[in-house]
Image (cartoon, grey):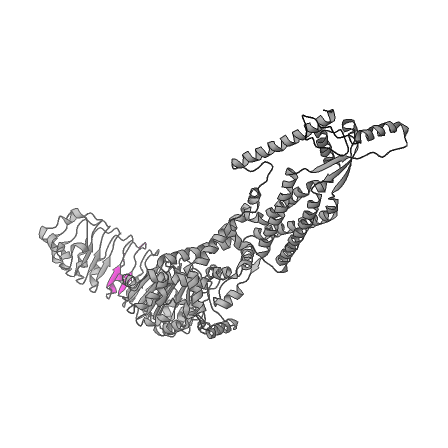
Amino acid sequence: MSPVLASVQLRTRLQAGARSSQGLWDLLLREEGAQPRNMIPVTEFRQFSEQQPAFRVLKPWWDVFTDYLSVAMLMIGVFGCTLQVMQDKIICLPKRVQPSQNHSSVSNVSQAVASTTPLPPPKPSPTNPATVEMKGLKTDLDLQQYSFINQMCYERALHWYAKYFPYLVLIHTLVFMLCSNFWFKFPGSSSKIEHFISILGKCFDSPWTTRALSEVSGEDSEEKDNRKNNMSRSNTIQSGPEGSLVNSQSLKSIPEKFVVDKSTAGALDKKEGEQAKALFEKVKKFRLHVEEGDILYAMYVRQTVLKVIKFLIIIAYNSALVSKVQFTVDCNVDIQDMTGYKNFSCNHTMAHLFSKLSFCYLCFVSIYGLTCLYTLYWLFYRSLREYSFEYVRQETGIDDIPDVKNDFAFMLHMIDQYDPLYSKRFAVFLSEVSENKLKQLNLNNEWTPDKLRQKLQTNAHNRLELPLIMLSGLPDTVFEITELQSLKLEIIKNVMIPATIAQLDNLQELSLHQCSVKIHSAALSFLKENLKVLSVKFDDMRELPPWMYGLRNLEELYLVGSLSHDISRNVTLESLRDLKSLKILSIKSNVSKIPQAVVDVSSHLQKMCIHNDGTKLVMLNNLKKMTNLTELELVHCDLERIPHAVFSLLSLQELDLKENNLKSIEEIVSFQHLRKLTVLKLWHNSITYIPEHIKKLTSLERLAFSHNKIEVLPSHLFLCNKIRYLDLSYNDIRFIPPEVGVLQSLQYFSITCNKVESLPDELYFCKKLKTLKIGKNSLSVLSPKIGNLLFLSYLDVKGNHFEILPPELGDCRALKRAGLVVEDALFETLPSDVREQMKAE
């Protein structure tokens, strides 16, 4: 066998063996369930485009379309990369050298020609009878040399674009996928998106959403037109800081649907109501959080801009380099010393396929880029940082749905591209009216009429009162308790008084303590006719309900709260002149002078109380205009003297100057002109003595000097023989004049917490005495004459130095053990029959 034939046969066997080994290896891998070697499964790239299924609601049509384009481009890249790995990249053959005129090369050429001359076919032999006849140009190159030549020409002669085209496609596609879904992965944005999607789904599926929309959709078109016309009118609205009230014209536009229909109250059970209530709170907090920034909008714009820039770059260089993918490539490498050849002609086996794939890829990228350009146009055509629910307000009739901004607005714009119904149903949970209706429904379910009746009690005015404290609103079931006479509301926000209050025929008193109130026009008309007593406690004078100035039949008005933050500034109230029936006015505040509004009702005002919390009250000349005033209280007003204007109130019957800074009361002599004055309270002051002029106040029946610094009681005091009530407790008195016996009308006498050492026997001449308080003194003996006080029902002797109680206490038949304040040990000194008598009912 010739050497040439042996070499050819050897190469054939090696190639066949290599192919069989590769086939066996791939077969084993398939049997073990693994992928064949050099294969790249597409599932490996899933993580670059995978996101939660719920996020699809934030993917508009262009994002979905570009995702499909990305998948197509990814398949092109993976297919190209797979071919690059599995198939031969390039096949090269040496070129034949053309003859030259250089003599020195003749021999080489001849040798090359001789070497490339076809050999005669091998003769058949007995050992190889079927030898195939081989034809072609002989190169004398073995398999390793061909592989070396192919690799060298692939690296040096083939254009880089032709080599790396599939990898570039793969990388660009992955970048596109990352840009499209990065805002779903970034922690600062993904948390907001997840929270929004979670709340959105719950709002969409909430039974309350369905009910709220079905209620407004059930309204006839004429009612909707009327509501739109009312919205377009510019009616004047009078309200406090929380929209407390409206005038009578605007009140008519308040829809009756504010009151929950009891016939459908059972349609939403308690659990569903609580879930809807929690959703309202979540939406409020989420809105406050998301509206603070625009990170979602900025990130989406940036990733879209990045995709557009990348699209332009890809189109630019691919269009220029796609022609570089050629089927035939000339290779000139200096490897003659290793192979004997320098010039080679190479065939890029995948050039034709790559050329077609590149054109297809450019088409996909062009469509992708145009879609991104449309996205940019949509982003900047109008402001996506603001979102208006105007169409929802018009369609549903829920007029108070607020517009939103920043990231909250941007996500709603994205939702609209998926399905506008999401925004419509979500808007229900942005409406304060909807929230109030839900609260009203929950309140009605919780506070049934029977439960409310259990809270009824009798107040200080002897009226049947219902106190409601710290509720989320006013239950409609309250208006089913027709026997109600007084309604007291404390710390309740967003109170709505509906027209059904007219069912409470017996209602005469209303107390509003730190409540913001809205009232229906029909309810206001009812209160104007029926309300007699109104009490309002507030934190700022702007919270005063403006409708109170129109309650023409109101008789008593009690105001508690700060009328001015700056006590040096004049305090103004709206005029009370329309309160024609007002007789009692009480102001507990920090006014520096009597408000002018009070002067407007001075002609018919009978009682005025000013509790000033220590603020000095000056300029009291307006008191002179209150000619019909019968009771006057100036408490804690930092008065150092009795105001002279008081002496002009000839109709005055009671005067209370508690907790002032009075030290001298010489002006008391002027009270003799007030013939009707029967009650004088000068307690809780710094009075050191009582002037003798007090004897001229012969009309006094009640006199209070407690909590002062009086040391001596003038005997002239007891010349006021009409006194029935005398309080001298908490002073420094040591001696009680015997003239006290002159007070034959005395029923109440207190000298508690003084320094009295003995009581005059004349005290027991006051036969009408019912209450005697002599505790916390220095008394050592209680006279047996105490038995003369037959009407005595209350006796306080605790805190003295008594060793025994007189058995004559048994003559005080009205005195019982509960009315005797004494140490237990001292009580045991009484005879047993007296003790039993006092213990008996």
| Quarter of the figure that contains the N terminus | top right
Residue nearest the viewer, comparing 13 with 75: 13
Q: Is residue 722 magenta?
A: yes
Q: Residue at x 75, y 30 (%)?
A: 121
Describe residue 72's horizontal placement relative to residue 792 as left or right: right
**Rendered location of residue 736, percent (x, y):** 23, 56
The answer to whether 298 is drawn above or below residue 381 in the figure is above
Residue nearest the viewer, comparing 833 with 705: 833
Q: Quarter of the image holding residue 646?
A: bottom left
Name the magenta segment's main secondary structure: loop
Q: Quarter of the image holding residue 445?
A: bottom left
**Rendered location of residue 576, percent (x, y):** 42, 71
Q: Is residue 700 magenta?
A: no
**Rendered location of residue 86, percent (x, y):** 63, 38
Residue nearest the viewer, comparing 424 with 603: 424
The answer to whether 562 is drawn above or below residue 527 in the figure is above
Tell how many labels. 0
**Magenta residue span:** 701-726
Residue 594 in view here: no
Describe residue 389's horizontal placement relative to residue 144 as left or right: left
Q: Residue at x 90, y 32 (%)?
A: 101
**Rendered location of residue 259, percent (x, y):** 39, 67
Describe residue 554's horizontal placement relative to residue 750 as left or right: right
Residue nearest the viewer, comparing 345 with 408: 345
| Quarter of the figure that contains the C terminus | bottom left
Residue 69 in view here: yes
Q: Which residue lies furthest to the left in this view?
A: 833
Describe residue 541's horizontal placement relative to residue 386 as left or right: left
Q: Quarter of the image holding residue 650?
A: bottom left
Q: Which residue lies furthest to the front in this view?
A: 126
